[in-house]
Amino acid sequence: MVKIEIDGMLREFPDGTSVGPIDLAVEDGELMVLLGPSGSGKTTTLRMIAGFIESDTGKVCFDGFDVISVPPSERNIGMVVQSVALFPNMTVFQNIAFGLEVNNWAREETIKRVEELADILGIKNLLHRRIDEISGGEGQRVALARALARRPRLLLLDEPLSALDPKLRERLQDEIKKIQRQFGITTIYVTHDQVEAFAVADKIAVLQNGVIKQVGTPDELYFNPKDAFVAQFIGHGNILNGEVIDRDDHNLKIQVKGGIIETTGDFGIGEKVALAFKPEAIKLDMKNQTDTLSGQLESVTPHLGGFKVILSVGNQKIVSFIADQNYAAELQDFEKSDVGFSIDQKRLKILT
Ligand SMILES: Nc1ncnc2c1ncn2[C@@H]1O[C@H](COP(=O)(O)OP(=O)(O)OP(=O)(O)O)[C@@H](O)[C@H]1O
Ligand SMILES: [Mg+2]
């Protein structure tokens, strides 16, 4: 549909808050997620791409053409925002058809297009209803159909599912992904929810304080975070701070609060490093027999079909998850005691 290239796009607000400079490329037909905590600049970035917020500097190119001076209505974009503003006194059909009628589509073409989209989105039986006669989830589908009606070359979605319950969100994530693939429409999808991001994304751009920290596939972000923010933000990542105390060729000994970690890398003695690892890289040993590290077992609590284990190591907390209920019960007896643990060296990433 369209390839997006953003280069140095920046907006500074009068109070000094800024979003950017943003550099980002979205390939034709790709679904790019903008993921970041509240206030990190996701909506502002999206609105700058749409043209609703002017950027102070930088370029926004659609297929190589800078659209900075093109008004939003001429950028050929479909947009869905968090608090969907459907026209309440119109029917579902009229809502979806609205943009087509404004653009003088022939009646027959309009009916065909609306029915086609309603069919794909599973809302064909609702076309005659008024907006106040449908549910929130159905409303999101109507909004999506309305955004897609004019065959936009770019789809911008700002937290399109955040008002919905978790089950429906999951279902609509799958549906949005399917429709996006089916139409091959270039899409930028904003969310602060990483589970949602991982469910829909081809690539994810992680934002913090108005700038992009890393862009990559979900796997790249999960297994190869470039900095401590991304390492921690994605997948309950853990960080332990340490210092290289010995080095033999590439074999390193790193002192952390809970003990010594042996691993490989290219860091010199005395260098301060951050060790990043995901919860599943941790192996617990409550009897503290074989393991090289120790920490205090803070808590073992039920969590999403398993148990969440929090250890404190010095003044840092690390998280692990276990599935087995009997094991969780055994571990609970060790709460507030020192326990041993080890970290799978292959799943350890050293950051500076
Ligand atoms: N018109 C404005 N004037 C001043 N500051 C603004 C304006 N619009 C946004 N900001 C600031 O810019 C930053 C980014 O806001 P933005 O709405 O893009 O965040 P977000 O990532 O979408 O957050 P959320 O997840 O809460 O929707 C915030 O610090 C916000 O306060
Ligand atoms: Mg926002």
Image: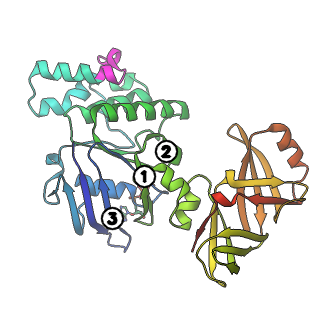
Residue in the image at 27% along x and 58% along y: 48
Local SS, label 2: helix
Q: Nearer the viewer, residue 49 or 61?
A: 61
Occupied quadrant, residue 257: bottom right
Q: Nearer the viewer, residue 27 or 54?
A: 27
Residue in the image at 32% along x and 38% along y: 85
**Residue that numbered label 3 is attached to:** 22
Q: CA distance from mark 1 to mark 2?
A: 8 Å
In x, y percent, where is residue 106?
A: 8, 23
Tell me the crowding category of disc 2: few under 14, some 14 to 19, or many 20 or more residues within 10 angstroms, Cα based: some
- Residue span colored magenta: 118-129
Residue in the image at 32% along x and 45% along y: 30
85 versus 90 height, above or below: below
Residue in the image at 34% along x and 31% along y: 179
Occupied quadrant, residue 132: top left
Mark 1 touches mark 2? (CB < 8 Å): yes
Occupied quadrant, residue 180: top left
